[in-house]
């Protein structure tokens, strides 16, 4: 009986989570006329891919996908690398005042991006990086690794000391201890961070909107914003674009899903 | 694994920086940004203008980028302040947008070009209010900072089939409109489609107030030319009549929570016979309503409306000459007629009237409004952030949480504060 209750509440939850996606998918394959006469909830009479194709052509979606992949991929890799270095120093190296360093990182994490945007714009403009992907990569590497440092530091402060001692006795330098011992053992955790950084950066809207001005540099979420008119919206095309926008993130999640589950269960190792 | 990742990262970075540096604009490039969809009247007309520009400027490369409205609105000032500014861009009109940019010195003064090329004569009087800004960034006088290309105004959309079924003629006065709405209510139909969560409801209230207003009233309210009394005859009439419309069931109480899109859909699905909203709906209604006959008709009296969004030339534009040439082309009869035939309101059409009678009606109504000096802008314009104040005040009127007097008080507060901050 209890099991059934759990099962049913899970079913309800799953339906609640999936419904918005279903509605988006339904409207993405409608024609604008169908949408106007039947509203958002009626089933489409046939599958019309015009909205999806028109949107793809209108914003040159392939280019946006590539931009997003380059930016998110670079950020995910760089932020993991920076986080590992920081966390090694803070979690294992026991730097003096590390608690305060962590507090600063955490506080920086809670700052709203709106507060950062003007200084970032100003600096980017001054150093000539405004409207380049590099500026966004640098900014998000810093933002994501602030969180990564915080998380990894707490993981690494519980790192088995015996392993480090053994490595030192075998003559390993600090660098070798990091690369040969710490990183391989924390790999599942790093994998999780990588996946999260990728998806978070992929979904970022506001800073890329401000920093990437020309269309050839834009990311997927910014390209979706093109459809938002001043007073009118094109519901079917917006749905089509939303569908195209989430598919890559979902695909990426599915591919790296195993890394995620491994990372979450890794704490259970004896 | 991490090593491989590192290599990938470095490679990615190199690729990024490599392609970032390659696009220095040359002297023969004309960069143009606007935020109209490719199927909208403006999108269609301006695509034609680009073609004509390319024909008359051989060797010049036109780089056109379609932007989002939100992107333009949020990042306009930042872009204009950088070296990546385009040569010409579409920008929202009004004190809080183009006016602010002009005050910050980010826009080129177009007055000389206007005089030389006769743009002011093409546009005619009245429409230039939103194109000119003084040193405070207040519209209506001073230098030219923008050139409008189309106009928009509030109009009344009627579902003709529903009127026929009730045996009603299309109303031409407010009294006839009220009588018609009574008939619909008696037949169990809510006559007026509107939406309280966005601009439509506040514009209806403003339209009602405007029936008792004149040019001086509008100027005092919009351009701060004199004292504004929110409890004068016009405002009081607007608010009390709106409240009465709600009480009599002309407007559904549920509409307080609806968005503009919901209003448009409800009208296009034939749920309500009347919609009072902007000409920006025209193209969509024309393209998507297949099941019933409909018409657009002028609102009796002064009417909310203005020029559309404008061309502005950034201060840092590299090829301003191209920008001026392009503006000139968009004001030519050929391009303006194209805009009109695609369902837009042209500001400088050619001599021949539109072939389609409905489009002709739409444009003739505009000419009548302009010639009668009856364009009254929009109720949320005078104060930055006034839009949300209006939304919440009018919502309370729909739900009955406030009486007309309280609602007008709510509108008066922020207005007085803003005018005081301008220093007279």
Image (tube, coloured by chain):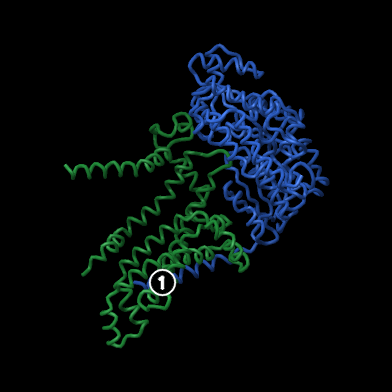
Please tell me whether residue B51 is drawn above or below residue B333 in the rendered image.
below
**Of the pair B417 and A74, the residue shown nearer to us:** B417
- Residue B248, given in percent of the width and then of the height, sits at 54, 19
The residue carrying mark 1 is A99
Mark 1: few/some/many CA within 10 Å (<14, 14-19, 20+): few
- Residue B222, given in percent of the width and then of the height, sits at 71, 38
Quadrant showing the C terminus of chain A:
bottom left
Question: Which quadrant of the view contains residue A232?
Answer: top right
Q: Is residue B164 left or right of residue A45?
A: right
Q: Colour of chain B?
A: blue
At a point 60% along the width and 46% down the height, the residue shown is B35
Please tell me whether residue A160 is drawn above or below residue B358 in the rendered image.
below
- Residue A260, given in percent of the width and then of the height, sits at 31, 60
Question: Which quadrant of the view contains residue A200?
Answer: bottom left
Q: Colour of chain A?
A: green
At a point 74% along the width and 39% down the height, the residue shown is B223
Q: Is residue A249 left or right of residue B180?
A: left
Q: Is residue B195 left or right of residue B101?
A: left
């Amino acid at each position: 009986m209890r099991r059934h209750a759990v099962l049913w509440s899970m079913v309800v939850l799953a339906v609640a989570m999936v419904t918005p996606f279903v509605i988006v998918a339904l409207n993405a394959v409608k024609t604008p006329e169908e949408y106007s006469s039947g509203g958002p909830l009626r089933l489409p009479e046939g599958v019309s891919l015009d909205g999806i194709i028109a949107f793809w052509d209108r914003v040159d979606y392939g280019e946006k996908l590539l931009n997003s992949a380059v930016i998110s991929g670079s950020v995910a890799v760089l932020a993991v690398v920076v986080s590992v270095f920081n966390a090694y120093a803070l979690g294992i190296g026991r730097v003096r005042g590390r608690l305060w360093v962590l507090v600063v990182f955490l506080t920086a994490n809670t700052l709203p991006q709106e507060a950062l945007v003007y200084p970032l714009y100003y600096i980017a403009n001054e150093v000539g990086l405004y409207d380049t992907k590099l500026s966004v990569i640098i900014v998000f590497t810093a933002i994501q690794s602030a969180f990564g440092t915080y998380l990894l530091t707490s993981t690494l402060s519980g790192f088995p000391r015996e392993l480090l001692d053994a490595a030192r006795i075998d003559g390993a330098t600090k660098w070798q201890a990091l690369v040969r011992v710490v990183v391989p053992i924390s790999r599942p955790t790093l994998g999780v961070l990588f996946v999260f950084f990728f998806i978070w950066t992929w979904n970022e809207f506001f800073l890329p909107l401000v920093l990437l001005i020309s269309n050839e540099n834009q990311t997927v979420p910014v390209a979706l914003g093109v459809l938002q008119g001043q007073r009118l919206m094109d519901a079917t095309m917006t749905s089509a674009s939303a569908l195209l926008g989430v598919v890559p993130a979902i695909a990426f999640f599915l591919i790296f899903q195993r890394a995620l589950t491994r990372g979450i269960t890794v704490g259970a190792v004896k | 694994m991490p090593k491989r990742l590192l290599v990938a990262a470095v490679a990615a970075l190199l690729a990024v920086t490599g392609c970032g540096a390659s696009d220095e604009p040359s002297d023969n490039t004309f960069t143009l940004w606007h935020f109209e969809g490719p199927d909208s009247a403006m999108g269609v007309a301006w695509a034609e203008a680009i073609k004509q520009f390319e024909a008359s400027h051989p060797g010049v490369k036109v780089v056109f980028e379609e932007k989002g409205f939100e992107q333009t609105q949020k990042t306009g000032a930042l872009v204009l302040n950088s070296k990546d500014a385009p040569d010409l861009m579409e920008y929202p009109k009004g004190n809080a947008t183009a006016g602010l940019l002009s005050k910050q010195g980010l826009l080129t003064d177009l007055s000389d070009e206007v005089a030389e090329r006769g743009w002011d004569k093409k546009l005619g009087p009245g429409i230039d209010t939103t194109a000119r800004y003084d040193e405070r960034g207040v519209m209506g006088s001073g230098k030219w900072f923008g050139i409008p290309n189309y106009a928009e105004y509030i109009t009344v959309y009627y579902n003709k089939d529903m009127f026929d079924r009730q045996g009603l003629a299309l109303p031409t006065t407010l009294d006839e409109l009220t009588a018609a709405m009574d008939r619909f209510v008696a037949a169990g139909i809510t006559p007026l489609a509107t939406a309280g969560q966005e601009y439509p409801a506040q514009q209806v209230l403003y339209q009602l107030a405007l029936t008792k207003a004149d040019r001086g009233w509008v100027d005092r309210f919009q351009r701060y030319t004199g004292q504004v009394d929110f409890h004068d005859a016009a405002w009081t009439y607007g608010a009390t009549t709106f409240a009465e419309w709600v009480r009599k069931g002309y407007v559904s109480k549920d509409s307080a929570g609806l968005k503009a899109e919901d209003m448009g859909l409800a009208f296009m699905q034939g749920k309500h016979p009347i919609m009072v909203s902007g000409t920006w709906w025209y193209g969509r209604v024309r393209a998507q309503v297949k099941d019933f006959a409909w018409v657009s008709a002028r609102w009796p009296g002064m009417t909310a409306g203005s020029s559309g969004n404008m061309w502005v030339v950034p201060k840092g534009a590299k090829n301003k000459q191209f920008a001026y040439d392009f503006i000139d082309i968009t004001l030519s009869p050929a391009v303006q007629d194209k805009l009109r035939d695609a369902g837009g309101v042209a500001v400088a059409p050619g001599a021949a009237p539109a072939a389609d009678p409905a489009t002709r009606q739409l444009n003739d109504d505009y000419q009548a409004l302009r010639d009668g000096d009856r364009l009254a802008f929009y109720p949320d314009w005078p104060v930055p952030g006034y839009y949300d104040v209006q939304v919440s005040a009018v919502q309370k009127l729909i739900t009955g949480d406030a009486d007309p007097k309280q609602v007008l008080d709510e509108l008066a507060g922020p207005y007085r504060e803003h005018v005081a901050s301008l220093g007279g």
